Image (cartoon, grey):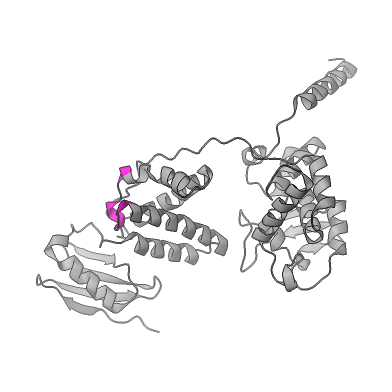
Amino acid sequence: MRNPKSIKVFGRSGRTYRIYFNPQRQHWYVAYEGTGERVRRSLGVTTRPEAEAKVHELDTPAHELPAHQSVRLTWAELQKLYLEYKSSQGKAVLTVARYRSAMEAFGRYLKKCGVEYADTVTLAVLDGYTSYRTKTEEADIKTAYTDALIFKNAFKWAAQTSRGLLPRNPSVEWETPEPVKPKRKVYTAEEVAQLEAGVRPWLRPVVTTLAWSGMRIGELINLRWSDVDFAQHVIRVRVQEEWKPKGRRDRVVPLHPKVEVVLQSLPRKGQYVFTGKLSGTLKETWCLSALKTDQEKLGLPEGDLHGFRRFFATTMMKAGVDTNTVRQWGGWQSLETMLRYLADSSPAEGVKAMYQAAERLAASGE
């Protein structure tokens, strides 16, 4: 289908505007003669009536903007355009959903502040977001931090001159230091053994596979039988058409004997290794809810699904596997990131390790 020709819209000021639909961007643009230069910018809308209304808003003297400034967008309009852009760049569905969640949270905050247009967001408004998100909505401080990174990037994207969506980036001076939090729980070997034996039957293979493969829960849920190679004794975590692992790249995880036994025992009901009720897709929320309930019944301290990944990294390191190999198995992009997962040694473990080191040094004559 050929691009439609531009449509003339005559403003009350006597200026002539031409609006046209961009099929690639899926929204309407306007072009007109500004103060000494040709202006072209997105109107941030998807229908012709909305485009004409935006032009009349632009043409109103009270809303006259300098040639470099964009048509005013509400936060909801900017959010829609940004999420469409991210989806078009091949971002995973769950990643886009996380972006949407963060931007909708910011939208709720802006509504509370009485702010409608994206270009009226101030530094003072931004500074109040973390308090709102953590105190009013009772979100975790890390959640508020990752939210901030997402919509800061949205402001930066919209303020790029070539897009013409925002005249400036209101968040450019907003400081968002990463919160310092204590290390999250790492399961002990005893706790993992109790969970493998004591949780409800359908959850047991999930616990064992997470604990002894280092896989993320999303990777486990999307694991297909075609990704499991029993002949080579490996699991291949692969980028799929409809799903991508964190890091967006393939990796190979050797099968721990316990994981191999568990996977061999599972029925093959479809293409996915782990299935939910009635052979449907397994859900992370189901796994986490069931895990917490069973931990309480077993009298164990509450932990999350990611705790098994931290257990895996710590256990493999203690078993003598070199750090770079553990990093590759777990799919961490950097050694620094992986090291944050390791459990701190207890005083008793530290003393034992020191004596063993001293004995080795004495035996070597050093």
| Picture quarter with the C terminus | top right
Q: Quadrant of residue 80?
A: bottom left
Residue 327 locus on image (x, y percent): 70, 44
Q: Quadrant of residue 1?
A: bottom left
Q: Is residue 242 magenta?
A: no
Identify the magenta region.
113-124
Does residue 44 appear to the left or right of 333 in the view shown?
left
Given residues 361 and 270, the one toward you in this image is 270
Q: Residue at x 76, y 49 (%)?
A: 297
Q: Is residue 36 visible?
A: no
Q: Residue at x 27, y 73 (%)?
A: 51
Q: Residue at x 68, y 60 (%)?
A: 286
Residue 53 locus on image (x, y percent): 23, 73
Q: Quadrant of residue 276?
A: bottom right
Given residues 149 and 332, the one toward you in this image is 149
Residue 335 locus on image (x, y percent): 65, 39
Does residue 341 appear to the left or right of 125 in the view shown?
right
Q: Vertical placement of 348 versus 68: above or below?
A: above
Q: Vertical placement of 96 versus 178: above or below?
A: below
Q: Vertical placement of 285 versus 132: above or below?
A: below
Q: Residue at x 40, y 39 (%)?
A: 175
Residue 273 locus on image (x, y percent): 77, 65
Residue lying at the far right in this picture: please name it. 363
Q: Is residue 121 magenta?
A: yes
Given residues 131 and 221, the one toward you in this image is 131
Q: Is residue 105 visible?
A: yes
Residue lying at the far bottom in this picture: please name it. 1
Given residues 81 and 116, the one toward you in this image is 116
